[in-house]
Amino acid sequence: MNAVMDRPGTRWNGLYADRLGWAYRAYQRFVMALSPEVREHLVGGDGANEPYVAVYGKTQVGKTTLLLELMEVRDSAQAGISEVLRGRRDYGRSATATAMEYRRSPDNDWHLDAGAGPVVYNDDEAMCDALCVLRQAMSERKLLSDAPVVVSIPSDRFQRPAGSGTNVRMLDLPGDNPTDEVERAHVARMAERYVPHADLILLVGRADDLSFLDPAALALPGIEDWQYVPNRFRIVTTYSFTPQSVQQYARQLDGSPDPARFRERLLDQIDTFGLALVPEAREPHRFFPLEFGQSWQAMLDVDQDFAARVAPVVAQVRAELHADIRASANEASRFRNACDIHIVARRQQEAGVKLAQATMERVARELAQAKAGYRVSTKGAQEAEKRAAAARARLAEREHVETMLAQVASINVDEQISLVDGLGTNTAYLYGRMSDFEEWLRKAFLALEPDDKARAFFGQSSPDMLGQVIALNRIVEDAFSSMRSRMSSYWRAEYYPSMSSSFAEDTSELRDEIRACASRAGKLAHKDWTKQFTLRLAQLQTEANAADSERAALDQVAKSLVEQQQSLTNQLAQTRNDLDALNTRLNQDSVLAQRFRTTLDQEYVTELRARRAALAASTSPLDSLSILLSIALLQEERRKIQPT
């Protein structure tokens, strides 16, 4: 009798155990054909590993307390466990130095596995010391394992008895500010290897600082593009009801508050913060505003009215998160993730195309600017070279200019002397000759300049000859003052050459003073032109040197711009190649993803036909019942994986 009864049970057990075999076969065929970019978003589908949840967030946002809450550690034990997990690290610094996997211990002792096998610790102090040593080894690069450190929490610290409910492993990742590059690189490796296989990922941050949702803050592999597969993520805000504005909002709500109102408010704050979320990512059920810990409990104890309104909301949100974790950490959820992988491919492609187009547009602009800059710098260098050559050509005329300046010092007064010879014998004629010469000398002085070739040397510059007229007048006045004084003392204006030599003496002196005035005026002019010559030499040399420096600088700029153009051209070509490769690869992934449902259907139909064939061939009513029930179970599993 027992043997007869065992056969149907054995048959049913085998059929039940194989209820997802068809899906695993389809899944494995599908995953192995995907590119690494998309494959990293899928969890393993072999069903052999216990499902687990990853927790990621900034430093000091309450991750550890949240983790213990979700693992259902007793409230009274949480503070002590948190202290142990800090490993004697100061408050205000992240308690997690590396990726830590938390699980329930099989006994009432602590277990620690840092890659060399589990070590058992009987009390909190010993475990705390062990974690302190572990953190030190990490900072000294002595922790060589690329697997998470596994911490098993004593079983007697949990709310429910061992063996009841679902055990979920928790992968705790350090905050986004590791203390040094050693920790940063280590955690990045952990995330790249293990986050893609998490059944659910919790992004944790304070409700009063939503910057943790900024893509720039989500720097770990598998997390930074969380909006591609939002069904694998949940957003948990801590300190959600601590701010006075939230408390006031809660008190002013009509009727009994419910989680939906606070989720809506949280989404409004995210919008206000300027964080763009795709429609799938902003679905309210993905957001969990929470409060927990001793400070929260103390606030509830003080304000009973507030506690009566808000505590049930927090409890309900917490319960919903527990339920979400249980629902997500199973095989059916894994397969649903695979069914949605075409979303990953499409959004990665869209993001890749958008980024590549933006890059190509930027590079094209920079390339155009580089080309324009090259033209400007080349033209500028040519113009500077011309200016330098022109300045040096003028400098080469120095000897000729110096010769011409020597001639400037010579004023020919022969004609003025000859006019003295024809003067009448009266002092009035001599006075008149003096005045006429003074006027003539002034004009001759102002007209003094070198020849055209030498004049070109000076360009637009010249000495201020007009400013020297006063000095010139003084020269003439000093030269003729003695004659004028003596002549004014004559008792008659008329000379009598036959009776006196005064006329001959005065005209001789007049000739001498005319020559002396011309000589002194020439020296004055030569002095001014020489001074201007010296200034012009320095100016031309400065212009030549400046033009040379400018040309050299512009040549260097042009050379740099040529190199920049080449680099930008290469970058543009590489971006186009990368975009082509991305489109090709992700198009293939998208095609494969679209085929996954077909593959599932094919495997399902094959399995269904096999069971129906077995049902048709069965001769035992009990065996037939087992097969029939397994067919119904098969259909139910298919609905879980591919809901209509």
Image: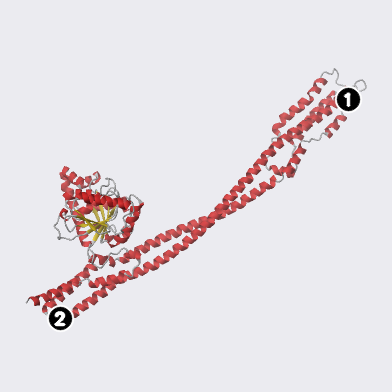
Residue sitting at 31 percent across and 66 percent down?
341
Q: In the figure, is residue 581 to the left or right of 542? A: left
Residue type, numbered disc 1: Ala
x and y percentages locating residue 563 in the rendered image: 52, 57
Residue at the extreme right of the image, as rendered: 498
Residue type, numbered disc 2: Ser
Residue 337 disc label = none
Residue sitting at 12 percent across and 73 percent down?
9
Q: In the figure, is residue 42 to the left or right of 414? A: left
Q: Badge 1 local density, few (<14 within 10 Å), some, or many (20+)?
A: few
* Residue 644 visible in image: no
Q: Is residue 595 above or below residue 134?
A: below
Residue 618 disc label = 2
> In which quarter of the view is residue 151 placed?
bottom left
> What secondary structure is marked by label 1?
helix
Residue sitting at 11 percent across and 75 percent down?
6
Residue sitting at 85 percent across and 17 percent down?
491
Q: Badge 2 local density, few (<14 within 10 Å), some, or many (20+)?
A: some
Pick the front one: 556 or 346: 556
For the C terminus, the quadrant is: bottom left
Give how far apart the Cα atoms at labels 2 and 1 are: 166 Å
Q: Is residue 90 above or below residue 410?
A: below
Pick the front one: 149 or 349: 149
Q: Earlier in the sequence, mark 2 or mark 1?
A: 1
Pick the front one: 616 or 77: 77
For the N terminus, the quadrant is: bottom left
Q: What residue is disc 1 on?
A: 504
